[in-house]
Image: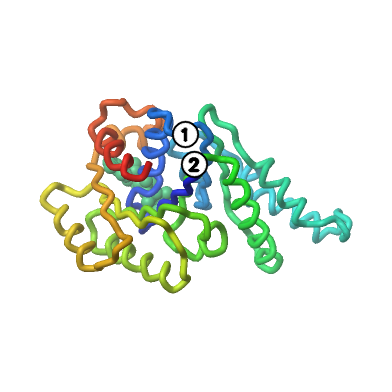
Amino acid sequence: MKKIIAFSGKGGVGKTTSLVLFLKYIIDTKKAEDILVIDSDPDANVADVIGEEIKFCDTLGGKMKVLKDKIQGFKISPNTPKNQLIESDVYNCLIEMDEFDLLEMGRQEGEGCYCFVNDVLKKVIDSLSKNYEITLLDSPAGLEHFARKTGRDVTDLVIVTDPSKMGIHTMKRILEITDELKLQFENFWVLGNRFPDDLKEVLEREIDKLDRDNLKLLGFISNNDEISKLNLMDGNLLELSPNNTSYQEAKKIFAKII
Ligand SMILES: Nc1ncnc2c1ncn2[C@@H]1O[C@H](COP(=O)(O)OP(=O)(O)OP(=O)(O)O)[C@@H](O)[C@H]1O
Ligand SMILES: [Mg+2]
């Protein structure tokens, strides 16, 4: 079954870390072979966490800028269908890693023709993800993003929160936005990252209070020194020791999704 799993939540709560732990889980357990990771954060978060450096010109934003400059400089015949140009740029942007493909959205500059570009992008990303068993999406806090890009087909929305009032507030806000935008997901999950044992029940209570049938607690991932160290030392989170306790917890809770 094809799955598109998006990781959202307040800034800095551990979206990218959770996504990469999930990616490691999929790779280690061979749950899927064709995996696409879409990093829609302009700051190329996923690449950072796996120790890859990606130039702006290799991101979709970079390619779109070149294309826009060409269109505005009349270097492309006005008759050339722009959808095709954008589509082929998206495919050219796929970075092939050993075990998955990575699409870095990068920064998107300027406005104007961008509505059009975003519209085409949304369609392309939808059809692109059809070629993969699993698509993982790292997204900045605002959910408008989904509405513009992949919203419709996202099967699982994982809302990550840390033990903070702001993290939980953003979690609730995200749920409200999904209602306002009428975004459909098969499953809504809440992932508590870095919760000390004695605070876990606070999150459990908050989720109970929301009283939503389709909202489930995925579970907790503990704060972990090896994760901090890999991040600080520019390491690759995919190379975390297989017996790392937080990874063990992550594997157990991710099995609820796939
Ligand atoms: N369970 C954990 N144990 C130790 N460190 C963690 C853990 N989860 C996240 N971190 C660290 O916290 C920082 C923020 O994590 P991360 O980059 O995953 O958050 P984010 O939500 O993706 O942030 P942003 O909104 O900026 O994209 C990173 O330095 C990361 O290494
Ligand atoms: Mg991030």
| Label 2 element class | strand
The residue drawn where x is 51% and y is 29% is 99
Amino acid type for the residue under numbered disc 2:
Ile
**Image coloring type:** rainbow
Relative to 126, is 232 above or below? above
The residue drawn where x is 57% and y is 43% is 103
Cβ atoms at labels 2 and 1 below 8 Å apart: yes
Relative to 193, is 248 above or below? above
Q: Which residue is mark 2?
A: 134
Label 1 CB less than 8 angstroms from ligand 1 = no
Q: Is residue 235 visible?
A: no
The residue drawn where x is 48% and y is 49% is 4
| Label number found at residue 73 | none
Amino acid type for the residue under numbered disc 1:
Ala
Badge 2 local density, few (<14 within 10 Å), some, or many (20+)?
A: many
Q: Which residue is mark 1?
A: 32
- 66 horizontally vs 76: left or right: left
The residue drawn where x is 50% and y is 52% is 41
| Label 1 element class | loop
